[in-house]
Amino acid sequence: MSVHTPAHAPQQSNALAGTALGVVGVAAGIAPWIAAGGILPVQNLWRTEVQKFQMPFSLLPVSQYYATSMFVLIVMGGVFAGLARHILARTWAAWPIALGVLIGHAVAVTQSFIADARGLNLDDTRSWWYLGGLLFGAIVAVGFAQVGYWLISRPSSGPAALGIALAAVPFAAWIGMWVQLLSGPMGIPQGVLLVLRWLPALVVGLALAWCGGWPPARLIVWVIGLSALWIVPPAFTAIQYALGSRVLAGDLGEMAEAGMQVFPAALAIGWMPVVVAAVIGVVGAALSAIIRRQRG
Protein backbone atom coordinates (compact mmCIF):
# COMPACT_ATOMS: atom_id res chain seq x y z
CA MET A 1 0.00 0.00 0.00
CA SER A 2 1.62 3.27 -1.10
CA VAL A 3 1.34 6.53 0.74
CA HIS A 4 0.95 9.60 -1.46
CA THR A 5 2.58 12.81 -0.30
CA PRO A 6 0.46 15.89 -0.98
CA ALA A 7 1.76 17.87 -3.97
CA HIS A 8 1.86 21.09 -2.00
CA ALA A 9 4.20 19.66 0.67
CA PRO A 10 7.44 20.42 -1.24
CA GLN A 11 6.17 23.93 -1.94
CA GLN A 12 5.47 24.49 1.76
CA SER A 13 8.92 23.16 2.61
CA ASN A 14 10.55 25.55 0.12
CA ALA A 15 8.49 28.42 1.48
CA LEU A 16 9.65 27.76 5.03
CA ALA A 17 13.24 27.34 3.87
CA GLY A 18 12.95 30.56 1.87
CA THR A 19 11.68 32.48 4.89
CA ALA A 20 14.55 31.10 6.95
CA LEU A 21 16.97 32.14 4.18
CA GLY A 22 15.65 35.68 4.37
CA VAL A 23 16.19 35.78 8.13
CA VAL A 24 19.72 34.44 7.65
CA GLY A 25 20.37 37.24 5.18
CA VAL A 26 19.35 39.80 7.81
CA ALA A 27 21.60 38.10 10.36
CA ALA A 28 24.51 38.31 7.91
CA GLY A 29 23.79 42.01 7.41
CA ILE A 30 23.99 42.90 11.11
CA ALA A 31 26.83 40.42 11.79
CA PRO A 32 29.68 42.98 12.10
CA TRP A 33 27.72 44.97 14.69
CA ILE A 34 26.91 41.84 16.69
CA ALA A 35 30.51 40.64 16.44
CA ALA A 36 31.61 43.97 17.89
CA GLY A 37 29.47 43.31 20.96
CA GLY A 38 26.08 44.65 19.93
CA ILE A 39 26.07 47.16 22.78
CA LEU A 40 23.78 50.15 22.32
CA PRO A 41 25.84 53.34 21.85
CA VAL A 42 25.86 55.80 24.73
CA GLN A 43 22.85 58.11 24.46
CA ASN A 44 22.79 61.86 25.06
CA LEU A 45 19.10 62.01 26.04
CA TRP A 46 18.82 59.20 28.58
CA ARG A 47 17.27 59.89 31.97
CA THR A 48 20.49 59.09 33.80
CA GLU A 49 24.12 59.12 32.73
CA VAL A 50 25.19 55.59 31.85
CA GLN A 51 28.67 54.28 31.07
CA LYS A 52 29.35 52.36 27.87
CA PHE A 53 29.70 49.00 29.64
CA GLN A 54 26.29 49.52 31.26
CA MET A 55 24.40 49.96 27.99
CA PRO A 56 21.96 47.20 26.98
CA PHE A 57 22.29 44.79 24.07
CA SER A 58 20.85 46.06 20.79
CA LEU A 59 20.64 44.38 17.40
CA LEU A 60 21.19 47.75 15.72
CA PRO A 61 23.27 50.82 16.67
CA VAL A 62 20.42 53.24 17.40
CA SER A 63 22.23 56.56 17.60
CA GLN A 64 22.54 59.70 15.50
CA TYR A 65 26.29 59.07 15.44
CA TYR A 66 25.71 55.66 13.82
CA ALA A 67 22.89 56.64 11.45
CA THR A 68 24.65 55.63 8.23
CA SER A 69 26.03 52.48 9.87
CA MET A 70 22.51 51.44 10.87
CA PHE A 71 21.35 52.08 7.30
CA VAL A 72 24.16 49.92 5.92
CA LEU A 73 23.52 47.04 8.33
CA ILE A 74 19.84 46.96 7.42
CA VAL A 75 20.26 47.30 3.65
CA MET A 76 22.90 44.58 3.43
CA GLY A 77 20.43 42.06 4.83
CA GLY A 78 18.29 42.41 1.71
CA VAL A 79 21.36 42.40 -0.52
CA PHE A 80 22.67 39.13 0.92
CA ALA A 81 19.27 37.48 0.70
CA GLY A 82 19.00 38.56 -2.95
CA LEU A 83 22.44 37.18 -3.75
CA ALA A 84 21.58 33.90 -2.02
CA ARG A 85 18.46 33.44 -4.13
CA HIS A 86 20.19 34.49 -7.36
CA ILE A 87 23.11 32.12 -6.87
CA LEU A 88 21.81 29.24 -4.75
CA ALA A 89 18.03 29.07 -4.86
CA ARG A 90 16.74 30.36 -8.19
CA THR A 91 13.94 27.79 -8.25
CA TRP A 92 12.59 28.96 -4.90
CA ALA A 93 9.72 31.40 -4.80
CA ALA A 94 10.82 34.98 -4.21
CA TRP A 95 8.08 36.03 -1.80
CA PRO A 96 8.94 33.74 1.14
CA ILE A 97 12.53 35.00 1.15
CA ALA A 98 11.35 38.61 1.00
CA LEU A 99 9.02 37.85 3.90
CA GLY A 100 11.92 36.38 5.88
CA VAL A 101 13.94 39.55 5.27
CA LEU A 102 11.01 41.67 6.43
CA ILE A 103 10.48 39.53 9.55
CA GLY A 104 14.17 39.68 10.43
CA HIS A 105 14.27 43.46 10.04
CA ALA A 106 11.05 43.89 12.01
CA VAL A 107 12.57 41.95 14.91
CA ALA A 108 15.89 43.82 14.75
CA VAL A 109 14.29 47.28 14.55
CA THR A 110 11.70 46.56 17.24
CA GLN A 111 14.20 45.11 19.72
CA SER A 112 16.71 47.91 19.16
CA PHE A 113 14.30 50.81 19.50
CA ILE A 114 12.63 49.31 22.57
CA ALA A 115 16.07 48.96 24.17
CA ASP A 116 16.73 52.63 23.43
CA ALA A 117 13.29 53.91 24.43
CA ARG A 118 13.51 52.26 27.86
CA GLY A 119 16.33 54.57 28.85
CA LEU A 120 15.26 57.78 27.14
CA ASN A 121 13.76 60.67 29.02
CA LEU A 122 10.41 60.59 27.26
CA ASP A 123 9.26 63.68 29.14
CA ASP A 124 11.69 65.62 26.94
CA THR A 125 10.24 66.49 23.52
CA ARG A 126 13.69 66.12 21.99
CA SER A 127 13.63 62.40 22.86
CA TRP A 128 10.54 61.88 20.75
CA TRP A 129 12.05 63.77 17.81
CA TYR A 130 15.25 61.77 18.23
CA LEU A 131 13.51 58.39 18.44
CA GLY A 132 11.03 59.18 15.67
CA GLY A 133 13.70 60.48 13.30
CA LEU A 134 15.93 57.45 13.72
CA LEU A 135 12.94 55.10 13.45
CA PHE A 136 11.90 56.79 10.21
CA GLY A 137 15.43 56.30 8.88
CA ALA A 138 15.39 52.63 9.89
CA ILE A 139 12.05 52.09 8.11
CA VAL A 140 13.43 53.76 4.97
CA ALA A 141 16.44 51.44 5.17
CA VAL A 142 14.10 48.42 5.44
CA GLY A 143 12.41 49.62 2.26
CA PHE A 144 15.75 49.94 0.47
CA ALA A 145 16.67 46.43 1.66
CA GLN A 146 13.53 45.10 -0.03
CA VAL A 147 14.38 46.97 -3.25
CA GLY A 148 17.89 45.52 -3.16
CA TYR A 149 16.54 42.03 -2.61
CA TRP A 150 14.02 42.16 -5.43
CA LEU A 151 16.54 43.54 -7.91
CA ILE A 152 19.42 41.20 -7.10
CA SER A 153 17.27 38.08 -6.80
CA ARG A 154 16.01 38.47 -10.37
CA PRO A 155 17.44 35.89 -12.82
CA SER A 156 18.11 38.53 -15.48
CA SER A 157 21.56 40.12 -15.28
CA GLY A 158 20.19 43.62 -15.92
CA PRO A 159 18.13 44.09 -12.72
CA ALA A 160 20.62 42.04 -10.69
CA ALA A 161 23.54 44.18 -11.88
CA LEU A 162 21.59 47.33 -11.02
CA GLY A 163 20.93 46.05 -7.50
CA ILE A 164 24.59 45.16 -7.02
CA ALA A 165 25.71 48.56 -8.30
CA LEU A 166 23.33 50.37 -5.95
CA ALA A 167 24.63 48.27 -3.04
CA ALA A 168 28.32 48.90 -3.80
CA VAL A 169 28.80 51.80 -1.37
CA PRO A 170 26.92 50.11 1.52
CA PHE A 171 28.88 46.91 0.84
CA ALA A 172 32.21 48.74 1.11
CA ALA A 173 31.03 50.34 4.36
CA TRP A 174 29.97 46.89 5.64
CA ILE A 175 33.41 45.47 4.82
CA GLY A 176 34.92 48.49 6.55
CA MET A 177 33.08 47.58 9.76
CA TRP A 178 34.72 44.17 9.75
CA VAL A 179 38.12 45.68 8.99
CA GLN A 180 37.73 48.16 11.82
CA LEU A 181 36.73 45.38 14.20
CA LEU A 182 39.68 43.18 13.22
CA SER A 183 42.15 46.08 13.25
CA GLY A 184 41.46 46.84 16.90
CA PRO A 185 42.93 49.89 18.64
CA MET A 186 45.79 50.12 16.13
CA GLY A 187 43.39 51.50 13.54
CA ILE A 188 42.93 50.59 9.90
CA PRO A 189 46.18 50.57 7.88
CA GLN A 190 46.46 53.17 5.12
CA GLY A 191 46.72 50.52 2.43
CA VAL A 192 43.45 48.95 3.54
CA LEU A 193 41.76 52.36 3.65
CA LEU A 194 42.85 52.89 0.05
CA VAL A 195 41.32 49.56 -0.96
CA LEU A 196 38.07 50.40 0.82
CA ARG A 197 37.94 53.75 -0.95
CA TRP A 198 38.11 52.15 -4.41
CA LEU A 199 36.11 49.01 -3.62
CA PRO A 200 32.73 50.55 -4.62
CA ALA A 201 34.17 51.55 -8.01
CA LEU A 202 35.40 48.00 -8.56
CA VAL A 203 32.02 46.49 -7.59
CA VAL A 204 30.08 48.89 -9.83
CA GLY A 205 32.49 48.37 -12.73
CA LEU A 206 32.24 44.58 -12.53
CA ALA A 207 28.45 44.76 -12.24
CA LEU A 208 28.23 46.93 -15.35
CA ALA A 209 30.61 44.62 -17.24
CA TRP A 210 28.36 41.69 -16.32
CA CYS A 211 25.27 43.64 -17.35
CA GLY A 212 26.68 44.62 -20.74
CA GLY A 213 25.30 47.30 -23.01
CA TRP A 214 22.88 45.29 -25.12
CA PRO A 215 19.95 45.66 -25.51
CA PRO A 216 20.26 49.46 -25.35
CA ALA A 217 17.74 49.60 -22.48
CA ARG A 218 20.52 48.28 -20.25
CA LEU A 219 22.29 51.60 -20.59
CA ILE A 220 19.78 52.76 -17.96
CA VAL A 221 21.56 50.44 -15.53
CA TRP A 222 24.85 52.17 -16.39
CA VAL A 223 23.44 55.65 -15.82
CA ILE A 224 21.77 54.78 -12.51
CA GLY A 225 24.70 52.71 -11.24
CA LEU A 226 27.33 55.35 -12.01
CA SER A 227 25.10 58.12 -10.67
CA ALA A 228 24.63 56.25 -7.39
CA LEU A 229 28.38 55.73 -7.10
CA TRP A 230 28.85 59.48 -7.42
CA ILE A 231 25.95 60.64 -5.22
CA VAL A 232 25.69 58.12 -2.37
CA PRO A 233 29.11 58.67 -0.71
CA PRO A 234 28.64 62.48 -0.49
CA ALA A 235 25.09 61.89 0.76
CA PHE A 236 26.40 59.59 3.51
CA THR A 237 29.03 62.18 4.41
CA ALA A 238 26.51 65.02 4.56
CA ILE A 239 23.95 63.07 6.58
CA GLN A 240 26.49 61.83 9.09
CA TYR A 241 28.01 65.31 9.44
CA ALA A 242 24.62 66.88 10.08
CA LEU A 243 23.42 64.23 12.53
CA GLY A 244 26.76 63.71 14.26
CA SER A 245 27.52 67.34 15.08
CA ARG A 246 26.98 67.90 18.80
CA VAL A 247 27.20 71.65 18.24
CA LEU A 248 24.09 71.54 16.04
CA ALA A 249 22.25 68.86 18.02
CA GLY A 250 18.58 69.68 18.38
CA ASP A 251 18.52 72.49 15.79
CA LEU A 252 16.98 70.74 12.80
CA GLY A 253 17.27 73.78 10.54
CA GLU A 254 20.97 74.25 11.25
CA MET A 255 21.59 70.54 10.83
CA ALA A 256 19.88 70.49 7.43
CA GLU A 257 21.78 73.59 6.32
CA ALA A 258 25.11 72.09 7.44
CA GLY A 259 24.39 68.90 5.51
CA MET A 260 23.50 70.86 2.38
CA GLN A 261 26.77 72.78 2.63
CA VAL A 262 28.86 69.62 2.94
CA PHE A 263 27.08 67.67 0.18
CA PRO A 264 28.14 69.73 -2.89
CA ALA A 265 31.71 70.00 -1.60
CA ALA A 266 31.91 66.20 -1.25
CA LEU A 267 30.19 65.75 -4.62
CA ALA A 268 32.77 67.93 -6.37
CA ILE A 269 35.66 65.67 -5.34
CA GLY A 270 33.92 62.30 -5.72
CA TRP A 271 33.96 61.91 -9.51
CA MET A 272 37.17 59.88 -9.94
CA PRO A 273 35.68 56.53 -8.75
CA VAL A 274 32.89 57.04 -11.28
CA VAL A 275 35.44 57.27 -14.09
CA VAL A 276 37.26 54.18 -12.84
CA ALA A 277 34.00 52.20 -12.63
CA ALA A 278 33.00 53.28 -16.14
CA VAL A 279 36.35 52.19 -17.57
CA ILE A 280 36.15 48.81 -15.83
CA GLY A 281 32.59 48.37 -17.10
CA VAL A 282 33.41 49.28 -20.71
CA VAL A 283 36.54 47.12 -20.87
CA GLY A 284 34.83 44.20 -19.14
CA ALA A 285 31.73 44.39 -21.35
CA ALA A 286 33.88 44.58 -24.49
CA LEU A 287 35.96 41.56 -23.48
CA SER A 288 32.82 39.62 -22.64
CA ALA A 289 31.31 40.45 -26.03
CA ILE A 290 34.50 39.35 -27.83
CA ILE A 291 34.59 36.05 -25.93
CA ARG A 292 30.94 35.37 -26.70
CA ARG A 293 31.51 36.13 -30.40
CA GLN A 294 34.50 33.78 -30.55
CA ARG A 295 32.51 31.01 -28.89
CA GLY A 296 29.65 31.61 -31.26
Image: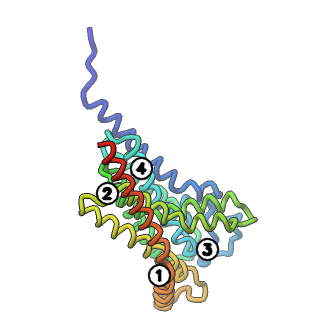
34 relative position to 275: left or right:
right
Question: Where is residue 13, by image quadrant?
Answer: top left
Name the outermost residue toward the top: 1
Q: Quadrant of residue 48?
A: bottom right
Q: Nearer the viewer, residue 229 or 134?
A: 229
Mark 1 or mark 4, whichever is nearer to me? 1
Q: Which amino acid type is marked by label 4? A: Leu
Nearer the N terminus, badge 3 or badge 1? 3
If you read the primary sequence from the N terminus, does the residue marked by circle 3 or circle 4 appear first? 3
- The amino acid type, in three-letter code, at marker 3 is Gln
Judge depth for marks 3 and 2 and give the one in front: 2
User: What SS does tag 4 mark?
Assistant: helix
Dot 2 or dot 1: first in sequence order is 2
State the separation of the CA atoms marked 3 and 1: 31 Å
Select label 3 or label 1 by which is in front: 1
For the residues marked 1 and 4, what is the alpha-carbon distance in whole angstroms? 30 Å
Question: What is the x, y in percent for residue 155?
Answer: 31, 48
**Circle 2 sits on which residue?**
159
Quadrant in the picture for the C terminus: top left
Query: Callout 2, which amino acid?
Result: Pro
Question: Disc 2 or disc 4, which is closer to the eye?
Answer: 2
Whether residue 283 is visible: yes
Q: Residues within 10 Å of mark 2 (few under 14, many from 20)?
A: some
Q: Position of residue 99 (x, y in %)?
A: 35, 50
Q: Are marks 3 and 1 in contact (CB under 8 Å)?
A: no
The residue drawn where x is 71% and y is 66% is 187
Q: Secondary structure at mark 2?
A: helix
The residue that mark 4 highlights is: 83
- Gap in angstroms between the C-alphas marked 2 and 1: 26 Å
> Which dot marks residue 267?
1
The residue indicated by pointer 3 is 43
